[in-house]
Image (spheres, coloured by chain):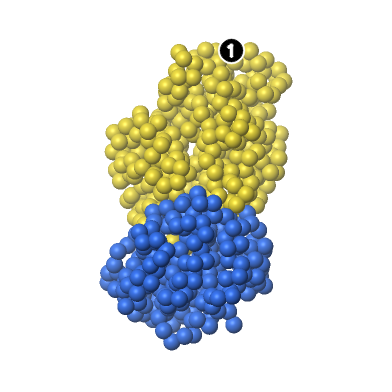
Amino acid sequence: MNRINQKLQEDKKLLSIYFSAGYPNLNDTVSIIQDLEKNGVDMIEIGLPFSDPLADGPTIQESSTKALSNGMTTEILFDQLKGIRQNVTIPLIIMGYFNPILQYGVEKFCKTCKVIGIDGLIIPDLPIDVYNEQYRSIFEAYGLINIFLITPQTSIKRIQFIDSISNGFIYMVSSAGVTGSSSGFREKQTTYFKRIADMKLKNPQIVGFGISNNETFTQATAYTKGAIIGSAFIKHLTKEGINSISNFTNSILN
Amino acid sequence: MGYNINEKGYYGEFGGAYIPEMLYPNIEELQLNYLQIMAEPSFKAEFDQLLKDYVGRPSPLYFAKRLSKKYNTKIYLKREDLNHTGAHKINNTIGQILMAQRLGKTRIIAETGAGQHGVATATVCALMNMKCIIYMGEIDIARQAPNVARMKMLGAEVRPALSGSRTLKDATNEAIRDWINNPVDTHYIIGSVVGPHPYPDMVARFQAVISEEIQWQLKNKEGTTKPNYVIACVGGGSNAAGAFYHYLEDINVNLIAVEAAGKGINSGKSAATSVLGREGIIHGSKTLLMQTNDGQITEPYSISAGLDYPGVGPMHAHLYTSGRAEFISITDDEAMTAGLELSQLEGIIPAIETSHSLAIFNHKQFKTDDIIVINLSGRGDKDLQNYIDYFKI
C-alpha cells in the first residue's frame, strides 16, 4: 500500500509541511525532511522550485527564487533525495509546476520518483483532463498518487468528479487566494469545511493555504483529516534557520 | 480548418488551459460563454459601433508609394497606428470590456509591458465606469513613465510587479494571482493572444477586424481580397493574429511573422521565441517559450518593450511548427533603421515593434507585382525618446 494511504488510515489529525527544496541553502533538503519527521510531522511536500509560480504568494515565490539562485534543479533535487528512504518513513510528495516536469520528461520524472520512494505528486497547473488522457497511466505504473485541489468556488459536481478520480486525499484550498495570503479563519471557511465534510466524500480532505499556528491548525482539522502548512514554515526557516524546526512544529501541535 | 483553434482549445498541439484549480471557475465561465456572447446581435452592434465612433475604424489601408518604389514592389500599410490610443490594442480591450459587462463583472485587471495595453485597458474602463487595476513590472514602470501617467490620468491604479524579473512576464503572474484572489467580481483583460483557452481565440477574434477590413479594402484598390503576403511583428502575437485571421486557411496568402532578434539570435539578448524557444507551459498555455534546460522561464530582450515576451501565442507556435507562416528575426539595429526610413519616406513614425516588420525588405526580395500588406500596429510617439537616444537626433 502506498505510504499516503497508510498514513491516512491512522487515527489522528495529520500535519503536513511544505518547503521549497534548495531553501534556505541548496543542500538543506535532506536535513529539513529528517528533522520534520523527527518532530512529529506526518507528511512532507517537497517544493520543486519554479521561476513563475502562479498560485503562490510572496513568501513561497521568494523562497523559490532563492532556491533557484542557489542552483537548485530537478536533477540536483533527485540526487539529494537518493537514499532518503534509508531513514525517512513518512509519505513524501513532490509539489511543483508542470513545466519543469515536462522538460525533465514526465515518464523519466515518475520513474525517478519511484526509485527514490516518492509517494505522490501535486502539480497545480496540470489540468485534470490532460492528466487523465495523457499521464494517468504513467503515474499509476510508477505507483504515484496524483493529488487534486478543490477551492470554495469549486462546484459540487466537480468536487464529486475530483473525488471519483482521486486516490489518497483531496487538497482543500481554504479560501480564494494564493498561498500565504490569509491570517486566521472566519466563519466562512468553517462553513465551507463543514459543507465539504457533509458531502461524505470517498477521499479524506487535507486543508491547505492560511494555516500558520495551533489555532488555525485546530480550526482547519475540526472537520478534516489534516492540514498543510507552507508559507508559515518558510517564514520560520527564513528567520530562525534550519536548526530550530522543533520550535515550529511544537507551536503548531501544542 | 487546419490552422485555427479546435473545439478543445488547441492549435495543433499548442494551447489548452494549464491553470491551477483556483482559476477553473473563471476560465470555465469564459469558455462556456464567450462565443455565444460574441454572437449576440446586441454585442456585435455595440462592438462595431464603438470601433467606428470611438476607435475610429475602419483604419485606412494606405498604399505606401515611396516605400514601394524603393523596394520595387507594392506595399500597403494597414494603419492601426491611427486608432484611438495609438495601436491595435484597443480593438481587444473594447471587446473584452463588453464581455466583462455581459458576465456581470465590476472590476478589471490587466498586465502591461510597455504600457500600450495598460493604456488601452484604462481607456475602456473609464469609458464604461469600471474599476481598473494595471499590473506593470517595477522596471517597466521606471522606463515607460509617460504611459504610467496616462493610465493614472485615466483613473487606473498602477500596481508594480515586484517579483521575479519585474517585467511583463511577472506583471502577468501578478495579474493572474490577483484573479485567484478575486474570483467572483473580476475580469482579467489579457492583452495578447496568450494565456489559457479561450483567451488566445477570444483576443484573436476581437483583433480579426483587422484582416476583415483588409479584405474589402484591398478588393476596392486591387480588385482582389487576397494579398500575396501579410506581414506583422510578433511578441505575444495579437496584431499578427488579427492581420492573419481571415487568411489562415488560404494558403495562397503567405504569412510572415517578424520576431525581435534583439542584439542577435546568438547574443544571449534576444526575444526570437520561435528560434530560441522550446515547447512548454507559460501563463496557462502550452506553446513555444524561452527557458533553461531545467524548464525555468528566461527573460527575453528587445529594444522594443512590446516584443520582449518569453513565449508566443499558441496560434503562432502552430503556424511556426506547421510551416504555415514564415518566421523572420530582426535585430534592434535593423528595426531602428527601418523605423527612420518609414518616417522619412512616408511621413509616418512607427512604433519600434512595427519597425521590426518594416525591416523585412532588407531580408527578403519581393516581386514587382507582389501585393504586400504590413500591419502598422502602432505609432511611434511612445518611442520618441528611444529613437532620439538611438539616432542622437
| Chain the render paints yellow | B
Residue type marked 1: Arg
Point out residue B66 in the picture as x, y percentages from the top left corner: 59, 12
Taking the image as drawn, is residue B118 in sight? no
Q: Residue furthest front?
A: A243
Nearest the viewer among B248 and B195 is: B195
x 40%, y 81%: residue: A13
In the rendered view, would you say A188 is above or below B264?
below
Nearest the viewer among A241 and A74 is: A241
Q: Quadrant of residue A77?
A: bottom right
In the rendered view, would you say B7 is above or below B269?
below
Q: Residue furthest bottom?
A: A11
Total marks placed: 1
Q: Residues within 10 Å of mark 1 (few under 14, many from 20)?
A: some
Point out residue B155 in the picture as x, y percentages from the top left corner: 28, 38
x 43%, y 42%: residue: B166
In the rendered view, would you say A23 is above or below B250?
below
In the rendered view, would you say A161 is above or below A21?
below
| Chain the render paints blue | A
x 41%, y 40%: residue: B137
- Disc 1 element: helix
Nearest the viewer among A22 and B127 is: A22
Q: Quadrant of residue A192?
A: bottom left
x 44%, y 34%: residue: B114
Quarter of the image where the N terminus of chain A is located = bottom right
Taking the image as drawn, is residue B38 in sight? yes
Residue where numbered disc 1 is placed: B66
Quarter of the image where the C terminus of chain A is located = bottom left
